[in-house]
Image (tube, grey):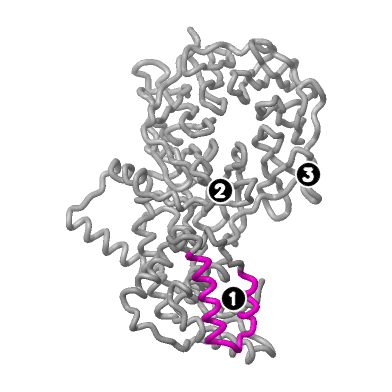
Amino acid sequence: MDDAGFDEYVHARLGQWSRVAYLLTGDHHAAEDLLQNALFKLAVSWRKVRIDTPDAYVRKILYHEHVSHWRRSHHLRAEHVTDRLPERATGADVAADTVRRILLRQALAKLTHKQRAVIVLRFFEDLTEPEAADALGVSVGTIKSQTFRALARLREVAPELHVLVKETREVPA
Amino acid sequence: MSDLRELLDGLAGEAPRYDVVPAVRARRQRRIRHRRIAGVGLLASAVIVAVGTQVPRAFGPPGDSPAAQPFPTVWNGCQAQRLPLPAGYDGVSAVGAMDPTGRYLGGGASRGQTSIAVIWDRGGQPRQVPVQGDSVGVADLDATGTALVSSVVDGENVGWIVRDGIAARLPGTDVAVLRFNATGQVLGRIGMRPMVWRDASRQPTPLPLPDGITQAAVYDIADDGTVVGTIHGTAGPRPYLWHPDGTGEELALPEQAAEPIQDVRVGAVYGDWITGAVRYGDSAGTTLLIRWNRATGRQSWWPARSMPDAYGDGIGAGADRFHDGRARLDPDTVHAGTDIELTAFGTGRTLPTAAGAVPPTNGPDAQFAAISRDGSVIGGSQEFPIAAGSEQTIPGAVWWRCD
């Protein structure tokens, strides 16, 4: 591709967007597909539209792709078990850590895609409510209500993760 | 970090870098081939129109007003014009400075062995800058036409403020003046040491350097006295901001970049905005244009082909080392046809050349020295035949106006 700067941008941000895609889908194959579609759209748009901040642009494509994919194939949504070993886990807490991750993965899978997107936007990407609203193209009020419902749902489906109860209290209504 | 954040971080750690770039590239190539076969071509003008109409404002930082968008719209209709010169001054001329509004341009003109500093008002016939000494140069101008000027008097570098035709010499010896602000505070150097003349009638104050830093470069001073520049330590060059009280802080660079920094420029500070660029030492020479908001602490960046030479509020102008915008050429063998570009951090416009200008064989089509705050006026020079029909060329002062 002759699109100046595209490769450099992707090189710099591929790791972060890979993590976001994985958190959104919970599955490596789905994450790879999602990321590939988002970056392809970015590549097509790279020279044609004015992109103020590439991160915001990719984020919008990624989350919209995620939600629209869900709309098209809601019935295909299922839990997946990764066949790749965790890259970070080391040391004595591996077992407990792994259990917590499995619990979280299962709990996230029980959310709607929009609720899941809100959780990733707010608690992994650490965006503010207005920023999350912008990424999803919804109002700040929707972000607040979706966050509340998502956390309530997590608390309901994964009571073992006590932290989520605490998290609910931390999020302003 | 909350526990939920830790959990999400842990889960995200299971994700490798998905190597989707080859697939994206292949899909892109297939699409291009398909479009070529189908005879679908996009005219450049059509693309430009789309730029102005399709981009939602929502890509800016939430909460900012449209006027505070991180990257302003680039100008479309630009014209290049050679600037008029005083009678008889048929030698080298160039623009070197501009006021933030773009009304006043400062530069130099020559005939034989004589050179003078001049100021153009709206591109009209220039007037000579009345200061003592040789090698007179205009460093900066304000919106009233007051000029910050340098000259050499008895072998010593001297700085002046010229207001209403009256020149006042700045205190200090071996003075190099760089910029001044709307309140008359002057940024410059004594020798190699960055200085600020908070009062143009008094001795300057040195800008303190952080511990371990022995070298600094300064570029601009805001109306509140804030200075922006770069510091050079063992970690290489870093962008830096000096507050009016003399304290300072580094300006954050994009955190994603792990490569060593080869070059940093902090071009301008206007209000809350600071513009600059960074080039990394990787094999691709990755270059990012950066805009910092010093009120919010937010930073926006954009991959670019090259570092601009002149910086406005959010728009820069630079000569690019690419041929036809495609192949990268060795910097030492820049060819004719090299793009000259007005770039608004993410979008670019190739600028026209002035009538009669000759593309040089050993450099870019133009040299840029100054740009207005909004990017609508640019000053610099291009090569022109020394006489009608001559193959020999010399630099001539040119300005570009966009609307």
Chain letter, disc 2 residue? B
Label 3 residue SS: loop
Q: Nearer the viewer, mark 1 or mark 2?
A: 1
CB-based contact (under 8 Å), mark 1 and mark 3: no
First-in-chain label (1 vs 2): 1
Q: In the image, which disc is placed on residue B290?
A: 2
Q: Amino acid at mark 1?
A: Asp
Q: Amino acid at mark 3?
A: Thr
Residue sitting nearer the eye, A48 or B27: A48
The residue that disc 3 covers is: B247
- The answer to whether residue A16 is above or below residue A54 is below
Residue sitting nearer the eye, B362 or B164: B164
- Distance between the alpha carbons at the discs numbered 1 and 3: 36 Å
Determine crowd level at label 1: few under 14, some 14-19, many 20+ residues with C-alpha closer than 10 A.
Answer: some
First-in-chain label (3 vs 2): 3
**Image spot of residue B190 (x, y percent):** 77, 30
- The answer to whether residue B243 is above or below residue A139 is above
Viewport quadrant of the C terminus of chain B: top left
**Image spot of residue B206 (x, y percent):** 80, 35
Q: In the image, which disc is placed on residue B9?
A: 1
Give me the residue at 53% from left, 72% from top: A119
Q: Over which residues does the magenta segment extend? A: A142-171
Query: Which residue is outermost to the front?
Result: A173
Label 1 residue SS: helix
Residue A98 painted magenta: no
Query: Which residue is outermost to the left?
Result: B38
- Distance between the alpha carbons at the discs numbered 1 and 2: 28 Å
